[in-house]
Amino acid sequence: MADLKPTPIFDTLEHLRDKPPSFKILPAHTKKDYPLGLDFLKQYDGSKATFESYRREIERVMQWSSFKANKSLLTFKRADIEAYIAFCMNPPIAWIATKRVARFKDKEGLRVINPDWRPFVVSVSKMEHKRGIKPDKNNYQLSQKAIQEIFTVLSSFYQYLLLEEHLTVNPIALIRQKSKYIRKHQTKAIVPRL
């Protein structure tokens, strides 16, 4: 399953509102995860940017739990979260794209999966792009901001599941040493001045 190419799970907010999909891609052991993820994401329909950020993280963790961990998000322990973060720091090449694309496309009046979509995207800076450097999947690196976002979104999601009484413990809260993933910069950034 190393070369599995994941497919998108959640469409845009507008399309989810108009016609919620009947989802058939996830394996049986994670079928409960989809409606819970969808209900959680719908809470953020007032902010498109927040919805998109949260959708990206929930979709990634659902892909990983379904096809790599082979277990439901509802059964995650601290070790599962740590394994997921390690996976995000070094995803398989088949899970990485070199450009952002829409998850779904319109085709003959239907919403269909975009086969070019991937959960992770490698990019280059504008300066590198101007110099002709192209994104290379082998150079994928998760930023500190992205790692912090994983913790933020998953913590919020598991808190939601806790409050909705789907869980008794938030596995994110059990990770005491988040510092081994998130590095804080102690030095002040140098601001160039004329």
Image: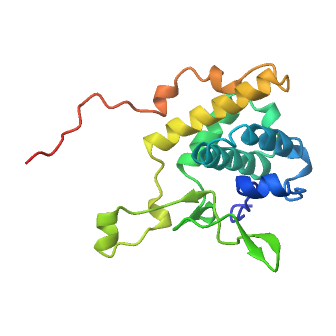
191 to the left or right of 167:
left
Q: Is residue 73 above or below residue 28?
A: above
Q: Position of residue 102 (x, y in %)?
A: 64, 66
Q: Position of residue 39 (x, y in %)?
A: 80, 39
Q: Is residue 67 above or below residue 129?
A: above
Q: Residue at x 78, y 28 (%)?
A: 161
Q: Residue furthest bottom?
A: 108
175 to the left or right of 129:
right
Q: Residue furthest left?
A: 194
Quadrant where the N terminus is found in the figure: bottom right
Q: Residue at x 64, y 21 (%)?
A: 173
Q: Position of residue 128 (x, y in %)?
A: 31, 67
Q: Position of residue 147 (x, y in %)?
A: 51, 39
Residue 144, picture quadrant: top left
Q: Is residue 76 above or below residue 117?
A: above
Q: Residue at x 74, y 28 (%)?
A: 160
9 to the left or right of 101:
right
Q: Nearer the viewer, residue 43 or 70?
A: 43
Residue 154, picture quadrant: top right
